[in-house]
Image (cartoon, rainbow, N blue to C red):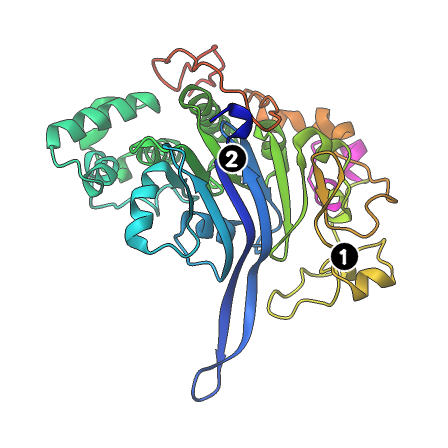
């Protein structure tokens, strides 16, 4: 198949996940929490797509539905396997999804909570290999040693337990476990939010280096816009279970089209007293996903709302090439982005290189030469531990 004819690695169409609300003596369903409500996006080979939004907007639930850790209520999750076959994972039986999990893995937010304290690293990292059929202990040990080297840890650490490591080292272990089966799609779910800022830079350097060397695609779930801006090729902004804006990173941060996106950027704190006074949060509260407002979910908090916003829900549409937004006034509004605040926010991510944007379909590049450890990744970009 020609490169231009190849479908995206992941295509999500109309994804929904509703949780029932039970009530009464008979525990009948009396309502629904629409955690994910008609979400659509694509992830291409070698691309980093970030999902951002306030806590509770449905980012993690979307990621879990993509991975089939949770059963979607409706929609399609189309994944292209290594052999070119495209499968809809949304309602596939678990026995048929299990082999696909070799090609898609998740990095969890809490590096300690996601590691079994009763198992050493050999058992933790080697478990995916064992579950997928590798019964030879020696082969598992060899693969675990290779993975520990890959993430910047010593192979002899494989006999130690999680409590012996720092938070950053535990997250390296979680990354090694996610890479054990050589996946093509990795879903980091707030992978650095539980770490110190200096350690965040090290882990992000490691993840970017692995992405280039192993030709990985990331569906990156985060809420820190300064991190997202530096690592993403494209960004999808979510609000109350819906994608309200989807665009290439530079376009989104310099020319936002949705008032919610612009408000998120203005709410980011900066270490500059001259700029701090101009930054303020959104009024009101996030809409209740169990009882959302009519029309646009954002209209009770939007300073630009008109009558049409209260009556009719806006569809996600392409207003300029590659830039999708769900707003009735997208063409009329002129919103300020984050570009003028780049200098003030840059220190949060010293040592983390900006990702190079890609335009689908992506062009596959040759992998960079392997590095000895994550403390000195390829190109000399490592942040000292």
Q: Quadrant of residue 138?
A: top left
Going 57% across and 64% down the picture, which residue do you hit?
34
Given contact means CB atoms under 8 Å apart, are the residues at marks 2 and 1 in contact?
A: no
Q: Where is residue 266 in the image (x, y as percent from the top left)?
A: 75, 41
Dot 1: what SS? Answer: loop
Most foreground residue, 252 or 365: 365
Query: In the rendered structure, does residue 268 fall within the stretch colored magenta?
Result: yes
Looking at the image, is mark 2 or mark 1 earlier in the sequence?
A: 2
State left or right for residue 235 relative to residue 77: right
Marks 2 and 1 sit apart, C-alpha to C-alpha, by 41 Å
Going 11% across and 32% down the picture, which residue do you hit?
136
Q: What stretch is highlighted in magenta?
A: 263-277
Most foreground residue, 367 or 167: 367
Going 78% across and 47% down the picture, which residue do you hit?
259
State left or right for residue 187 relative to residue 32: left
| Disc assigned to residue 283 | 1
Q: From this viewpoint, which residue is outermost toward the front? A: 1
Query: In the rendered structure, does residue 164 fall within the stretch colored magenta?
Result: no
Q: Is residue 319 above or below residue 207?
A: below
Q: From this viewpoint, which residue is outermost toward the bottom? A: 25
Q: Is residue 243 above or below residue 268?
A: below
Q: Where is residue 83 in the image (x, y as percent from the top left)?
A: 36, 32
Q: Residues within 10 Å of mark 2 (few under 14, many from 20)?
A: many
The residue identified by callout 2 is 7
Q: Nearer the viewer, mark 2 or mark 1?
A: 2
Q: How crowded is mark 1: few (under 14 residues within 10 Å), some or many (20 or more)?
A: few
Dot 2: what SS? Answer: loop
């Amino acid at each position: 198949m020609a490169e231009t004819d190849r479908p995206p690695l992941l295509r999500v169409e109309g994804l929904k996940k509703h949780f029932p609300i039970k009530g009464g003596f008979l525990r009948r369903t009396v309502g629904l929490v629409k955690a994910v409500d008609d979400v659509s996006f694509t992830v291409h080979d070698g691309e980093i797509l970030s999902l951002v939004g306030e806590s509770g907007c449905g980012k993690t639930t979307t990621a879990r539905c993509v991975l089939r850790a949770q059963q979607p209520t409706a929609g399609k999750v189309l994944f292209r396997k290594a052999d070119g076959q495209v499968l809809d994972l949304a309602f596939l039986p678990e026995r048929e999804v299990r082999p696909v999990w070799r090609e898609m893995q998740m990095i969890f937010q809490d590096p300690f909570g996601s590691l079994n304290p009763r198992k050493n690293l050999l058992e933790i990292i080697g478990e995916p290999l064992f579950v997928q059929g590798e019964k030879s202990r020696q082969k598992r040990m060899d693969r675990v040693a290779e993975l520990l080297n890959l993430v910047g840890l010593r192979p002899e650490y494989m006999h130690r337990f999680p409590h012996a490591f720092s938070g950053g080292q535990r997250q390296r272990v979680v990354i090694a476990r996610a890479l054990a089966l050589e996946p093509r799609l990795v879903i980091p779910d707030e992978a650095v939010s539980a770490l110190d800022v200096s350690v965040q830079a090290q882990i992000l350097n490691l993840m970017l280096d692995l992405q280039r060397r192993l030709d990985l695609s990331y569906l990156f779930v985060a809420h820190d816009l300064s991190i997202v801006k530096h690592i993403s090729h494209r960004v999808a902004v979510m609000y109350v279970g819906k994608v309200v804006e989807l665009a290439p990173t530079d376009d989104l941060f310099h020319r936002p089209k949705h008032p919610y996106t612009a408000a998120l950027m203005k709410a980011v704190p900066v270490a500059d007293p001259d700029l701090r006074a101009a930054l303020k949060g959104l009024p009101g509260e996030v809409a209740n996903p169990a009882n959302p407002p009519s029309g646009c979910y954002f209209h009770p908090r939007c300073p630009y709302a008109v009558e049409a916003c209260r009556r009719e829900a806006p569809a996600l549409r392409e207003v300029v090439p590659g830039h999708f937004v769900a707003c009735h006034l997208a063409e009329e509004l002129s919103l300020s982005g984050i570009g003028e605040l780049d200098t003030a926010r840059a220190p949060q991510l010293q040592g983390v290189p900006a990702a190079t944007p890609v335009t689908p379909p992506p062009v596959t590049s040759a992998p960079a030469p392997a590095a000895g450890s994550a403390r000195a990744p390829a190109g000399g970009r490592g942040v000292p531990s």
